Image (cartoon, coloured by chain):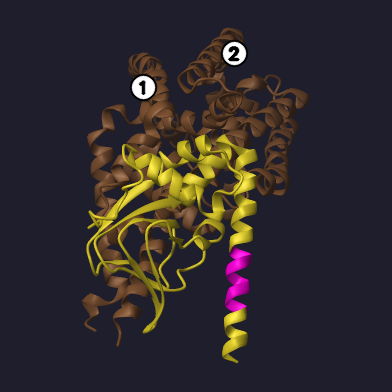
Chain colours: A yellow, B brown
Amino acid sequence: MANIFWSNIFRKGESELQVITQLWQETPLFKDIPERHTASLCAKMHLRDFKAGEVIFNQGDQGAGAILVLDGKVRVSAQTAELAVLENGDFFGEIALAAPERRTADATAVSVSRLVYFLKQDLEEWLEHEPRLGTQFLMNLSATLAQRLYEANQLIARQA
Amino acid sequence: MSWQQSPHIRTFKLFALVVAICLASFYFISSVLIPVIISFTLYALFQPAVYYLVRHNVNHSLSILIVLVLLVITSGVMIAFALPALIEQVSLLQAKLPQIARQLEQLLTFYGAKLSERIGTDIDVSEVTLSILSKTSSLGQAALINVSNGLVSFVIVFILVPFLTYYLLKDFKNARNEMMNWLPNSSFELGWLIYYNVSTRLQAYTHGVMLQSLIMATFCSIGFLAIGLDIPILMGAIAGLFNLVPYIGPVISIVLSLLVGAAMTPFDADILYLSVAVIVSAQIFDNLVVIPSVVANSVNLHPVQAILGIIIFGSLFGTVGIILAVPAIVSGKIVFNNIYADMANASLKATP
């Protein structure tokens, strides 16, 4: 459940679509993509509600797209180690947009959560509609994945 | 882990459920199945054209209307030009049918006598001929009944298809999203993944097969025209159409062209060899050039799987089954493999 005291007090009057658009727009994936185009894409994304403790995906599952936390908290873990706790505006699982790879960690809703799925199907249909912006998005996606790889390498180097 | 909990068994159960739902859906829409299939094919073919217009700032509904109007006009013009020629060729074929029968009898008598000499037994050629002719005539009668029923179906198809295609191009994605939202959270990604894999493969298959048929029809028509076979355009069109049925279609095309060649007067055996040569070279061109560049990767089926599938689907669902066999098996394989991968991972997770 969203925190009544803190949630959305600065976004009074905004529709859910505007909130989703703004959250995606703030991520590196939508850098340099005009807001109205992001909004038209966000209108086709998929909202799902999860109960506290419900599994979002398991390590080894086939991924269908990236996921944005709209409300709630999501725990990302591998085996027993907690990797991250994601909150409003955070996104994860973007590897699935680039390659048919399996999920590399477990994701579980810590509290009641509302998630936005941006599926590979949506991306491909958007690429057909907007190939230029789609190219920009793919550049952003590559940069994001490269950044994640760099961070993972740094972590391994520190642990070694 | 009990055998009932094994990923194989769970996959088979879920897959059987999916197949049952598909069959039930086909049963419920069986009266409009052909218009629905044609509309989905047109949807797959013309969706890129609609996207192209939308990209150039044309309103979505207007884009669909422009594409459909262009389609109707093009089909109308093609029918207006090609129909008289096709009708002429069909009536020519009808006129030649008795001659084909006589020629067939002569050929059977000739080769039957030779075969009898070789193996030393008598073959009753007239009985064989009678059997073939009676089967052909019953097929002909069935075809005539089909043609009269077909006229009614044609009107239904002609009215329904543009409407269905319009609404598919306009609203299919919204309806699809609504339906996918019914999936529980645990199967949401798997459902979309299966949809993505199946739709991508089927769209590529539809584009590839249509282009392949057109290329084959053109190739065979030119070939038949060059060798001087009767009714070359009709025979080329038939060869292109039968090319939709892998492996078995080309054999049927060869038999038909042999029959037409055999009925030509004066009888010229070279025409028969050349007809076979045209279809065989068309198949070589198809396998070496068209399939790798046009249909590549959209169908990843072993020939035995395809042939068995065509025979089974054909015996269960008739002509529609023969045409749908390959895409249905390809889709079935994708669904099964994805469900199995998911079940196997879940089972691995559950194992302590």
In x, y percent, where is residue A96? 50, 60
A145 left or right, relative to B131: right
A100 left or right, relative to A68: right
| Residue at mark 2: chain | B
Location of residue B335 by image quarter: bottom left
Residue closest to the eye, A98 or B13: A98
In x, y percent, where is residue B180? 31, 46
Q: Residue at (57%, 82%) from the top-left corner?
A: A155
Location of residue A108 by image quarter: bottom left
Q: Residue at (40%, 15%) from the top-left corner?
A: B158
The residue pinned by badge 2 equals B78
Residue closest to the eye, A115 or A18: A18
Secondary structure of the residue carrying numbered label 2: helix
Q: Would you place residue B131 above or below residue B352 in this image?
A: above
Q: Residue at (40%, 40%) from the top-left corner?
A: A18
Does residue A26 appear anywhere in the picture? yes
Task: Check disc 2 and give the amino acid type.
Answer: Met
What count of labels does the image hold?
2
Task: Give yes or no for residue A150 being in the magenta stretch.
Answer: yes
Q: Report, in whole angstroms, how far the alpha carbon at label 1 lies from the one at label 2.
A: 24 Å
B209 left or right, relative to B195: right
* Marks 1, 2: nearer the viewer: 2
| Residue at mark 1: chain | B
Task: Give yes or no for residue A5 being in the magenta stretch.
Answer: no
Location of residue B216 by image quarter: top right
The residue pinned by badge 1 equals B146
In x, y percent, where is residue B124? 47, 40
Instruction: Please give the range of residues in magenta.
Output: A145-153
